[in-house]
Image (spheres, rainbow, N blue to C red):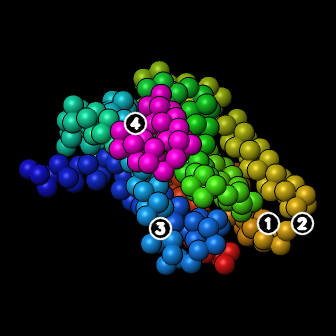
Amino acid sequence: MHYKLVKAVIKVSRTGNLLIIALTQLLASAFLISGETMASSLMNKRLWLLMFSTAAIAAAGNIINDYYDIKIDLINKPEKVVVGKDLKRRKAMALHTLFNIMGIAIGALLSWKIALVNLTSAFALWYYSNQLKRKAFIGNVVVAALTGMSIWIVGLLYSKFSMLLLLYTLFAFFFNLIREIVKDIVDMSGDKTFGCTTLPIIWGIRKTKRFMLWVTGVYYLTLLGLTAWYQDIQIMAFTSLLILPVGFIFYFLLKADTRKKFRKITVYTKIIMLLGVLSMALWI
């Protein structure tokens, strides 16, 4: 019985994603901000507290998202539904509250700024699941911004600014924004049934694709502008490294015309984001 509950909690909190968040913050600390070695970062207790608090807030967000989306998920992805099946709704809500309290309290031990970010993130994730997820675009932006903030918050821990940290924050924001919009296309059938007003439902798939292609172009033009402005070798290298993945996403968005192809794009963006995280180790 306990094993089944633990398994359900691991699944609903998306432990794999939480580990990626922790890895991202560890690499950002070691290679973008602190100037420490990887070994020193691993020994930094404050960094571990930050990783744990961010993961707790993210886990709470994943749980509350599944809590509100049971009916939609039973249509879009019935095999992945946990809340209401393997995990009672009452226990899911209790876990959501517990993880949020832990994340905010640990953030307060680090600094009031981190506590405020965690509090704001917890509220934003609840409001997203309760309301914004069913609204066109704004919900996508909120989730993408929170993903970027999980990187930017490392700078708050060390009270340091790094242009590379900003570039990786924008990278996480952009690719997650595209991924969230594509997921809306994949989930159109369930979303329509329950009255959601996502971009693909309002605009249709073709217009939504054009919008994503436009966003992709704006993102890369922004990188080129920063490269020209700062004329820094690391920024130039970062921009050059992104030519292939941005072009890759642009091409597959152009070609996508079925649910299966759009689902593949969500996988591609996740792989690119993981490779992007690992690329932090290049900036030694």
Q: Earlier in the sequence, mark 2 or mark 3?
A: 3
If the image is split into quadrants, where does the C terminus sit? bottom right
Query: Which residue is depicted at the point 47% across and 55% down?
Result: 50
Q: Which residue is mark 4?
A: 65
* Amino acid residing under circle 4: Asn
Residue 44: mark in rendering: 3
**CA–CA distance between discs 1 and 2?**
7 Å
The nearer-to-camera label among 3 and 4 is 3
* Residue 34 placement (x, y as % from top left): 62, 67
Whether the magenta-drawn stretch holds residue 15 is answered as no
* Amino acid residing under circle 2: Gln
Q: Which residue is mark 2?
A: 231
Query: Which residue is depicted at the point 22% across and 54% down?
Result: 7
Is residue 98 visible in the rendered image? The answer is yes
**CA–CA distance between discs 4 and 2?**
42 Å
* Amino acid residing under circle 3: Asn
Give the magenta part as a residue range.
100-127
Q: Which residue is mark 1?
A: 235
Q: Is residue 117 above or below residue 280?
A: above
Q: Is residue 202 above or below residue 149?
A: above
Residue 226: mark in rendering: none
